[in-house]
Amino acid sequence: MRICITISSRVNLERLHPLRISRRLIRFDPSATPFLNEYNTIEVKSDQKSSPSSYLQKIKDLRSGGYNGPLGIGLEGHFAGAPDLAYIRSALDTLASAKLPIWITELDVSSSPNQSIYLDQIMREVHSHPDVNAIVLWTAWSPSGCYQMCLTDNNFKNLPTGDVVDKFLGEWKMLDGLTGTTDANGYFETSLHHGDYQVQINH
């Protein structure tokens, strides 16, 4: 179970009482991980209020305030245009220094002719980072449309964004049943997507 607590660096922490919220959640389910969820941390490098350094400071504030329980890093990921991939990578590297699980919690891209291209670029960038544990897309369908990005039309036929996601997931499935033989020195080398794998060795 994963619970995201939205605590923005733009509001007064005292008013939100995040420590009290976190402690109540942990009492309800000790296995739950509260996530400090923020926007613009990887999307907009000019927003200093939610920069990676500001985000890390907010974690320090929670810890110094007495909360020492489990905690995760939640990054919303609402992109408004062409992504700055180098900045995304740098921001994730900075946040990874906290040694906490990182989730992309609300990934979407605003509507544009290049929406599906940008989505593909962002998904590949965040998925390739070794410290990103999960990616959640913000694409809930409704008859009146989605927040920023739908994966299907109203007849549930794929839109270009849906094709991107299906292709992305399909690339993982291609790895099922991968076999190989070591060389004379006992080495086997292959290229794999970032993730966890079960390996069976026969000799």
Image: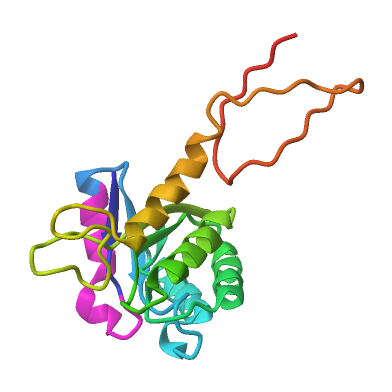
In the image, 141 versus 100, the foreground residue is 141
Q: Is residue 77 magenta?
A: no
Residue visible at 47% across and 75% down?
42
In the image, 177 versus 85, the foreground residue is 177
Q: Position of residue 92 (x, y in %)?
A: 55, 67
Residue visible at 32% across and 77% down?
110
Residue 70 in sight from this viewpoint: no
Secondary structure, magenta segment, majority class: helix
Q: Is residue 20 magenta?
A: yes
Determine the residue located farthest toward the top in the rendered image: 203
Residue visible at 59% across and 53% down?
130
Determine the residue located farthest toward the right in the rendered image: 185
Total marks shown come to 0
In the image, 42 versus 152, the foreground residue is 152
Q: Position of residue 157 (x, y in %)?
A: 22, 53
Magenta-highlighted residues: 8-26
- Quarter of the picture holding the C terminus: top right
